[in-house]
Amino acid sequence: MDGTLDHTMIRVADLEDSLDWYETHLAYEEKDRYEGDDFTIVYLGPEEMHEDGAMLEITHNEGEEPEVGDAWGHIAVRVPEGELEDRYQQLMDDGVEDYRDPESCGGRYAFVKDPDGHEIEIVQRDPDEGALWSLDHTMIRVEDADEALGFWTRKFEYDEVGRWEADSFANYFVEPRTAPPEAMSVELTYNYDGRSYEMGDAWGHLCIRVDDLEGDWDRLLDRGAADYRDPESCDDMYAFTTDQDGHEIELIERDLEADSLFPF
């Protein structure tokens, strides 16, 4: 199973406001767009993103106001080492609301919010590890760390590549075994107090690029993954499973040389 993280999907209330925010502040460009009868999907990312870098998928459903839950945490974007404070100040100068500045985060990272309240962490990385503002990781909250790690390591053959354990919570980072440094990771956050989370609908799903949709889907089912939306129910274009906490995970085959990023 290839297992490259292809994109993270979020839902937004105003498509044009969201596109303007990401294009203005993170210099994202529109990679492709699909117009449905009552919804629009747009893929975004840095102009010079790596072919294994993850895109941001923005979905707008007409007439809907998405609600942000706390089961999804944030996306993280990259800036070069030593540029955190300057890049954060640049966002402030451009009119982005001050949410969690570098000083409040010990000078290690910072946070802003997009127009819908999606949290965006800013992390420092080696300049060779992906384009400016490229997606570094997506954080999701889990209610059982052992189950969550087991899900990703057994179902998708991911490796645990990092962890940070504090007094009240722990963060675990997982990614494909052969992931290049430009690829996105998944951050699993586990709070020790046994709390539960609300999913909301403003965060949509993670998407994993696979080589063989039917074969990899069958392999996931053999490993006990949830049969949520199988390939046949999705016109054999993609499929969805869920993790132990109900986070949706899309599987898709992607022809990087095709004229369109969409399989429609």
Image (cartoon, helix red, strand yellow):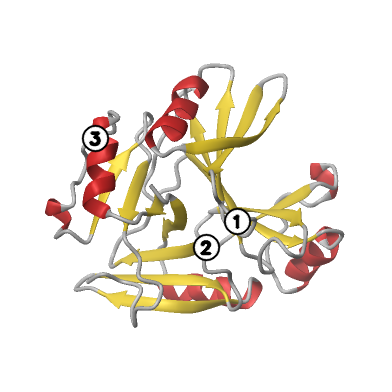
Q: CA distance from mark 1 to mark 2?
A: 7 Å
Q: Please state which of residues 52 and 144 is positioned toward the viewer in this rendering.
A: 52
Q: Which structural element holds mark 2?
A: loop
Q: Nearer the viewer, residue 248 or 201?
A: 248
User: Mark 1 vs mark 2: which is more N-terminal?
Assistant: 2
Three-letter residue code for mark 1? Pro
Left or right? Give the position of 43 relative to 227: right
Question: Which numbered dot is residue 5?
Answer: none
Q: Which residue is mark 3?
A: 221
Per the image, the residue denoted by label 2 is: 52
Q: What residue is rendered at 63% in x and 32% in y? A: 171
Q: Which residue is mark 1?
A: 180
Horizontal side of residue 230 vs 8, given as left or right? left
Residue 61 sits in quarter: bottom left
The reply to whether discs 1 and 2 touch (Cβ–Cβ < 8 Å) is yes
Amino acid on which the number 3 mark rests in the picture: Leu
* Residue 78 is at least partly visible in this image: yes
Identify whether 17 is placed above or below 259: above
Q: Is residue 207 above or below residue 221?
A: below
Q: Residue at x 84, y 60 (%)?
A: 85
Give the left or right position of residue 11, taking residue 127 as reference: left
* SS for callout 3: helix
Pick the residue in front: 82 or 197. 82
**Which x, y percent locates residue 44?**
49, 71
| Lower sequence index among marks 2 and 3 | 2
Q: Earlier in the sequence, mark 3 or mark 1?
A: 1
* Quadrant housing residue 244: top left
Determine crowd level at label 1: few under 14, some 14-19, many 20+ residues with C-alpha closer than 10 A: some
Q: Residue at point 42% right, 57% down? A: 9
Report x, y in % for residue 8: 45, 56
Q: Is residue 75 visible?
A: no
